[in-house]
Amino acid sequence: MKVVCIGAGNVATHLSQALYKAGFVITQIVSRTEENAKALALSVDADWTTNPDNIEDADIYIYSVSDSALGEMIHRNPRKNGLHVHTAGSMSLSLFEGYKERGGVLYPLQTFSKGKAVNFKDIPLFIEASNADDLNVLRELASGISNKVYEASSAQRQQLHLAAVFACNFTNHLFAIAESILHEADIPFEVLRPLIQETIDKTATLSPREGQTGPAVRKDFNVMNKHLDKLTDHPEWQEIYRLLSQDIINNHRG
Amino acid sequence: MKVVCIGAGNVATHLSQALYKAGFVITQIVSRTEENAKALALSVDADWTTNPDNIEDADIYIYSVSDSALGEMIHRNPRKNGLHVHTAGSMSLSLFEGYKERGGVLYPLQTFSKGKAVNFKDIPLFIEASNADDLNVLRELASGISNKVYEASSAQRQQLHLAAVFACNFTNHLFAIAESILHEADIPFEVLRPLIQETIDKTATLSPREGQTGPAVRKDFNVMNKHLDKLTDHPEWQEIYRLLSQDIINNHRG
């Protein structure tokens, strides 16, 4: 199977390199940015181009570009043959309709940062295609790089992406707020790590709802008011504190 | 050193048992609830009472009770001698003033749930006392059960507690929301675990602010609006989504 990778950002880089290591042949990297295209192509022994008109013939075209660029790249890729696959959580499979005969989705449920290696084998991959044959092709590809391959419809994948924003992106932002709060008291973020790790480990035996601790679930308004007072200089965090505490209280009513 | 433990809840249980395992002598457990007092006393080979008037003479009295009960328990403990220590994040050392000659704090920065074992050795313990001798006593006690003992003032400890609410309690609530969102699409929470683990692992090499990913930091309003639409039946989560996304955008401005 010859694979062309369209995109050279975080997802494209981690995915291309995982495919390459698993023995798939990446023939070409396509990116608007010459520097990124060259660097990624070099690391996976592929050709590269910045011009979609020059996209070479392949069995699979994988689009890992921003959601806003995705439609245009599908449109601009002159190749009609082969299986066209995007990797976006919130974009539907139907995006390929009218442009390509065979469309599919391979959504890696993970957060990728430049220069931070991840073990692809553990990343859940959610696949979707419009027919059983293409689903099998995608399953073969996905199973080559991960031990966790699931089928998901476009609707399910969108829920997954939404849940991931809460569990990952928003969680990370709460860590950023905690870091700022500690910084004001000259305490390094490091000291929170065992607590954070335990918060996650606990979800293996208790559901997050059952495992809820803290002043809000105890309805300890004395502590909550002290905390709100301490946030006087940060009205936006005060509002986040209020809203999340109220939702915890509502969630544990009766 | 003879230790009396006042309280028999989650913190009291985990702390008493850690002290017992480390070789400290717990002479008595004090709790309003006979059942809890008995069970904990049995596990640490101690006497028990439900009546504060019967508190026995000891070298150290450790109060692990709710913030709202703490003042009263200090007041009702007839023993004036020895070192009196509370374990509350948001309560000041000055709470002992006028009641006991020697006061201290030992704050374990961890989330405790009944029936979920934790490795005390890794739990950061923050200690405070009004004089160097008592600080040494507390350091000896704390070092016996944890490898991570730090000094912190009451003001620092209150910031720590506030940061912990964001990093642990609120984070856990975001997991609970994510679990509900996945449940609506018939997907188990389990699939989010590698993503959540990576979100934390990343903070070892990138600060949370630097490691921020997701639609908000990319200012991808298209995806954000899709997500808000999907939350129409949950106006409270919609509001949380809006507030956290806006704060991420503000935090990464120019």
Image (spheres, coloured by chain):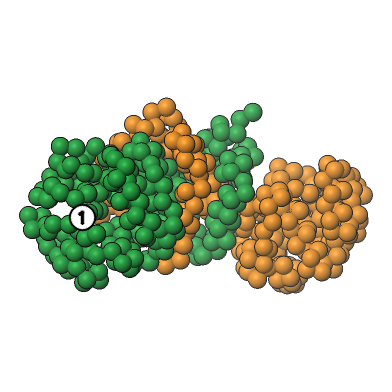
Chain colours: A green, B orange
In front of the other: A103 or A75: A103
Q: Quick one: A7 or B147, which is closer to the camera?
A: A7
From this viewpoint, which residue is outermost toward the left? A53
Can you see residue B47? yes
- Residue A170 visible to the viewer: no
For the C terminus of chain B, give its image quadrant: bottom left
Write the residue at 38% across / 56% down: A143
Q: Residue at x 24, y 65 (%)?
A: A25
x and y percentages locating residue B106 in the rendered image: 69, 61
Q: Is residue B222 left or right of residue A175?
A: left
The residue depicted at 82 percent of the width and 67 percent of the height is B24
Q: Amino acid at mark 1?
A: Asp
Q: Where on the picture, by quarter, is residue B83? A: bottom right
Q: Is residue B145 left or right of residue A118?
A: right
Rendered-image quadrant of the N terminus of chain B: bottom right
Q: Count every numbered label the image shows and give the total.
A: 1
The correct choice, above or below, for A156 with respect to B6 in the image is above
Q: Residues within 10 Å of mark 1 (few under 14, many from 20)?
A: few
The residue at which mark 1 appears reads as A59
Q: Residue A31: x percent and y percent?
A: 16, 59
Position of residue A80 measured from the top left corner of the image (x, y, whole percent): 13, 47
- Asked if residue A254 lies left or right of residue B104, the reply is left
Residue at the farthest front position: A133
Which type of secondary structure does the marked residue at label 1 adopt? loop
Residue A16 found in image quarter: bottom left
x 38%, y 66%: residue: A117
